Amino acid sequence: MVAGRTHPAQSLPGPLVRWSGGVRRYLGGPCCAKEPVALAAGDYRDGRELSGDGTLHSPGCNPRRAYSGNSMAGGHIGALYGVNTLGAVAGIILTVWYLLPALGLRASSITLGAVNIGVAAIGWMLSRRTSPAEDDRAPASRRLMVTLTITGFLAIGFEILGVRVLSQVMENTIYSFASALAIYLLGISIGAALYHRSGREQWLDHLLGLAAIACLGGIFILARAQAIYSSFRAAFGDSTQGVAAAEMLLAACIFLPATVLMGAIFSLLIQRQTTELPRLLAVNTLGSALAPFAFGVFLLPVIGSKWALVLVGLTYLTLLSRRRLLLPIIAVTLAAFSPSLRLVQLPSGGTLADYREGVLASLAVVRDEDGNRTLKVNNRFQMGGTSAASTEYREAHLPLLLHDNPRRALFLGTGTGITFGAATLYPGLQADGVELLPEVVEVMGYFKPENFMDEYDDRLRIHVADARRFVTTTTNRYDVIIADLFHPARDGAGTLYTKEHFTAIRARLNEGGIFCQWLPLHQMDDQTLRAVTRTFLEVFPSTRAYLLHWSIDVPVLGLFGTDQWPQYTNGWVEARGSSLQNHLKRLGIADSARVFGNFVAGADALRRFAGYAPINTDEHQVVTYAAPRFSYQRNATPYGRLLTVLEVEAPPSDFIRARNVYLKGLVEESEGRITQAIEYYIESARISDEFTAGYARCISLASLKAKDHPQGARVLLERLIEAQPREKLARDLLERLFPATQK
């Protein structure tokens, strides 16, 4: 050592020196005992520097030599960067899969905060034993600062674009995005480690060119992402671990080639002027911070994900310091022939009527061969369509009909506008609609005339906003609030089923106001359904449950809450205006029997059903973490929860008892047990002559049997006549099909 000259590493405490050396050995780099490893590596103040083997070079031995990947100084920073990023990967997995579900948001934050404080305390105590040394090296060059800014900008831009496209393929749960982020960071960590082992500064242009190719090549992989993901799902199955593995492998196919190179590039650049490490980290972070706005808010909606990714790849080429032809030629060729990233699955004979990429999601309007239009968000989520218009109308009518005189209504989630537009049928009713995605509002015209947009007037007003934020900030009060079907497993949707959200909604209701939360039973498991039900009961103790329609393919349950239920009379629905009656007749709910015939259970029965299920809160988001497990089950029947809720309370009327029997018949028929299904249908007809669905289904089956199994058709019709002798339809059909036997 030279008297009076102290390398920064000389003052490091022994434990930190040993730890940093262990890191270098873990990542494969040399560790020399001649000179301790520095946290912030650099030249000696007299111009000497560390070589790759840890020995010293005098000023005469090329003191301004740039550090190679294996230099003691540069390698140390790469090692720390790689290990730090690897720790971030572990933090993502630990937090999302274990801490948050087990401890909740607050306890997890406190736990992680305590760990951070502990680490900071250890660092502070160690730093007290350190005597920082002056460093008179030249400042970082402007080119280096610009390069670090741009590479940070491009790295985060690539992540944003990749995740956006993957959202059209993966399950879109909280675990999906955690998986993608973990793989992204893992690639950066691997890149830093690999560069630490064997990288050289002369590789910078090669790394930049390869990063351009990797980003552009990712477009081709993304275009095949659906097929790749399907093969992974088939291989790993539907378990939580299997789906996580499939999503991580898909993310690895997209992210790893590029992020490994990005990690190596960052390590190389950050090691060039380590005396100004804070400034270098600052400009790189600045570029990263600008990327979400530039790519997510501006470029995605303007030029789309494909061309934004092309821009990322080609921008890497602008950073090359030398004229190299091969890599740019390959990159430009990939850009020229890059495939479309409109990953929309079309039905047979269907066409894509419209496609838009917005700030929050990608949206498509699909037209099938019959002319029906369907709205799809991120390819995986259907938000209604004209073929299901009758069901969407009922989402509005049932809550509005249960109120005695609705004057103002709020619809949380407008989708196609079909449900929202039904409010125009109620004279004097003003309605607000809240829709998160502006692109959804823009394409509502595709769903005319079913959404009544031709009759759009100033009584209807659409707000592009977050539903929770709108409810907590508006000063309006409503007679009826209707919350759309929110897929519980979708990332962010779980917060729309929390106690805090329901409480905010209750505060926006007028006295006697009704809140309806529609629940997609086909997208929920029993645990999630019970948790949401108990949470709803916490806010609305007098809750009642109604079915949306009599379907087993897409069963929907509505939880209705109010502070005071009206006294319903026999002619409750019939008393509504004639213009509304005509529309209700087409939906089969023009009389009180059929409206109240959707009743499932009252508050006491629902409370017994919910039992001690956990309450879904912002602190403990039970739905967010539990619902994905069921959504992974591709072979789960959609009607499992429907059969469960039908047993919650004994049917209060023959009509409802006949309805339940009929629904069980539909289940038997869907599973191929037609004989048992017919028994249920006939029993349904026998129980109630007002409930006609079972009777009508028997007529349809008899007509189908008449050609190939005439004897079976005749027996079925005779049994149906016996079950409901006052109805003439079965007798008339029997006489028409078998005239000789009736003489």
Image: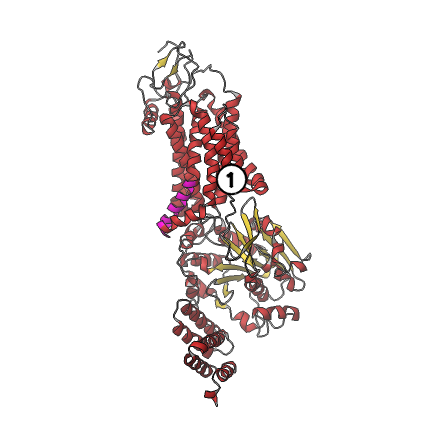
The residue closer to the viewer here, 62 or 418, is 62
Three-letter amino acid code at the position of disc 1: Phe
Say whether residue 668 is visible: yes
Magenta: main secondary structure equals: helix
> In the image, is residue 285 above or below residue 721?
above
- Badge count: 1
Q: Is residue 377 above or below residue 641?
A: above
Where residue 727 appears, as percent x and y from the top left, is 51, 82
Name the residue that disc number 1 marks: 337
Label 1: how many residues lie within 10 Å, few (<14), some (14-19) or many (20+)?
A: few
Quadrant the N terminus occupies: top left
For the view shown, which residue lies furthest in the right direction? 458
Q: Residue furthest left?
A: 33
Q: Residue at x 42, y 29 (%)?
A: 264
- Colour setting: secondary structure
Q: Nearer the viewer, residue 440 or 704?
A: 704
- Asked whether residue 236 is drawn in magenta, I would say yes
Residue 334: percent from the left, percent from the top?
A: 49, 37
Estimate the x, y position of residue 416 in percent, counting from the top left. 58, 56
| Res. 400 image quadrant | bottom right
Q: Position of residue 445 (x, y in %)?
A: 63, 55
- Residue 118 shows in this picture: no
Magenta segment boundaries in residue numbering: 235-253
Please check the rendered image and state whether residue 281 is part of the magenta-colored stretch, yes or no: no
Describe the element under mark 1 as helix, strand or loop: loop
